[in-house]
Image (tube, rainbow, N blue to C red):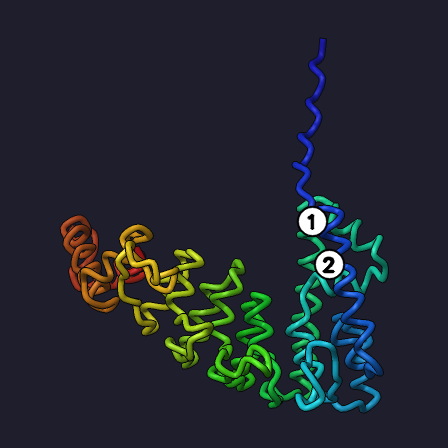
C-alpha cells in the first residue's frame, strides 16, 4: 500500500495584535487622517506610497516640495511636511490602513499570518524605495528645514537601509536635530539616536552608515540619557560595537545598590561580558588592538605554510569582525 503524503504543517497563528488592540490602532489612524485637512493630491500619494499617483502629480508640474499640515505637525508654526518627509516617515501600518480604507480591512491584516504580513511589508518597502527615488530624481530637498523630522530621520525610524543610503548620497544632513515636541525643548532627536531607539532589523547597519557619513557618535542626550546608555538599556548587542567603534562613549558603571542609578548606566548586576572587556581595555580601540593581536597569534602559525606572512593580517582583518565580540 502506498503511504499517504503528510500534509504540510500549518503556519503558527501569530496575529499582529489582538482584535481590541487592532481596533485601537485603527481608530488612532482614522483620527489622524480625519484631522489632516485639505491634503494636496501629491501629499496623499506620498503618504500612501502610491507611485503612479505621485508620478502623475510630478508630471503635471506640482511642486516636489509642496507642504502639507497634519496632526503630527504640532501646531501652525512648524511649516508642514514635504512629500519626501511623508514618504520616508509613514509607517507600514499606516499605509496598510490607508490602502484598506476600513477598520475591518485593518483587522483582517492584523489577524493574517506572519508570512502574509511579511509579503505585504515587502511590497510596501519596495513602493517606498521607488517613491523616494522618484522624489529625489525630481529635485526633492533632502533637508527641507522646519522643526519636523527630516527625511533621514524618518528613514532611520522605519529601518530602511537603502533609503538611508539614498538620502545620504543626496546630501542629507547626518547631524540635523529636531525637538521631540515643541514643548520638550530639552529633548532632541538625531538620526543616529532614532536608529538606536527603533530596534529595527537593520539598525546596526544603518548606524554604521550614519557614522561613516559623519554622524556625531555622542549626540545630545534624550531624557537625560546618552545614546550609549539607551543602547545598553535596549540590549541590542549588535549595535554596541558599531557605536563604540564610531566613538560613542561607554557610560561609567553605577553601584547596583545606588537606588538613583535607574538604567542610566550599566552596573554589576546588568553588566555584559563584552562591555566588561571594553572597560578593562580602557577603550574600544584598545580592545580592538588587543583582539587583533590575539587573533594574529592564533592564526599566523596556522596560515604561514599556506600564505606569505604579510598576507595573514589582511586575511584575519577580512575574516573577523575585530573588536566586535
Q: Is disc 1 placed on a helix, strand or loop?
A: loop
Is residue 35 toward the left or the right of residue 231 in the image?
A: right
The residue carrying mark 2 is 25
Query: Percent x, y for residue 68?
Result: 75, 85
Asked whether the residues under the numbered discs 1 and 2 touch, taking CB atoms below 8 Å apart as contact, a structural biologist would say yes
**From this viewpoint, which residue is outermost toward the top?**
1
Residue 320 seen from this side: no
**From this viewpoint, which residue is outermost toward the front?**
259
**How many other residues sit within 10 Å of disc 1, few (<14), some (14-19) or many (≥20)?**
some
**Residue at 26% in and 58% down:** 255
**Residue at 60% in and 90% down:** 145
Front residue of 259/90: it is: 259
N-terminal of the pair, mark 1 or mark 2, is 1
Front residue of 318/89: it is: 89
Q: Number of numbered discs present?
A: 2
Query: Percent x, y for residue 267?
Result: 29, 57
Dividing the picture into quarters, in which one does residue 279 lie?
bottom left
Q: Is disc 2 placed on a helix, strand or loop?
A: helix
Residue 287 seen from this side: yes
Dividing the picture into quarters, in which one does residue 284 lie?
bottom left
> Distance between the Cα atoms at labels 1 and 2?
9 Å
Query: Percent x, y for residue 14?
Result: 66, 42
The residue carrying mark 1 is 17
**Residue at 82% in and 83% down:** 40
Amino acid at each position: 500500500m502506498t503511504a499517504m503524503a503528510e500534509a504540510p504543517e500549518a503556519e503558527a497563528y501569530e496575529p499582529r495584535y489582538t482584535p481590541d488592540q487592532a481596533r485601537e490602532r485603527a481608530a488612532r489612524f482614522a483620527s489622524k487622517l480625519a484631522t489632516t485637512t485639505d491634503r494636496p493630491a501629491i501629499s496623499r500619494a506620498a503618504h500612501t506610497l502610491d507611485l503612479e499617483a505621485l508620478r502623475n502629480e510630478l508630471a503635471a508640474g506640482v511642486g516636489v516640495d509642496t507642504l502639507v499640515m497634519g496632526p503630527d505637525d504640532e501646531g501652525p508654526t512648524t511649516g508642514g511636511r514635504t512629500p519626501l518627509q511623508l514618504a520616508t516617515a509613514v509607517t507600514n501600518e499606516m499605509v496598510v490602513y490607508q490602502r484598506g480604507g476600513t477598520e475591518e480591512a485593518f483587522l483582517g491584516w492584523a489577524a493574517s499570518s506572519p508570512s502574509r504580513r511579511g509579503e505585504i511589508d515587502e511590497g510596501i518597502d519596495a513602493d517606498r524605495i521607488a517613491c523616494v527615488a522618484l522624489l529625489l530624481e525630481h529635485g526633492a530637498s533632502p533637508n527641507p528645514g522646519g522643526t519636523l523630522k527630516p527625511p533621514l530621520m524618518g528613514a532611520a525610524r522605519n529601518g530602511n537601509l537603502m533609503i538611508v543610503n539614498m538620502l545620504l548620497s543626496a546630501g542629507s544632513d547626518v547631524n540635523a536635530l529636531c525637538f521631540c515636541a515643541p514643548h520638550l525643548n530639552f529633548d532632541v532627536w538625531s538620526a543616529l539616536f532614532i536608529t538606536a531607539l527603533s530596534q529595527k532589523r537593520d539598525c546596526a547597519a544603518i548606524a554604521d552608515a550614519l557614522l561613516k557619513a559623519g554622524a556625531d557618535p555622542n549626540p545630545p542626550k534624550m531624557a537625560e540619557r546618552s545614546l550609549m546608555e539607551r543602547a545598553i538599556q535596549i540590549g541590542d548587542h549588535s549595535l554596541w560595537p558599531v557605536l563604540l567603534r564610531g566613538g560613542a562613549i561607554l557610560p561609567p558603571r553605577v553601584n547596583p545598590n545606588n537606588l538613583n542609578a535607574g538604567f542610566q548606566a550599566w552596573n554589576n548586576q546588568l553588566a555584559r561580558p563584552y562591555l566588561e572587556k571594553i572597560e578593562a581595555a580602557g577603550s574600544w580601540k584598545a580592545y580592538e588592538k588587543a583582539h587583533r593581536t590575539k587573533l594574529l597569534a592564533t592564526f599566523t602559525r596556522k596560515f604561514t605554510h599556506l600564505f606569505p606572512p604579510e598576507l595573514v593580517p589582511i586575511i584575519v582583518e577580512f575574516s573577523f569582525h575585530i573588536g566586535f565580540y
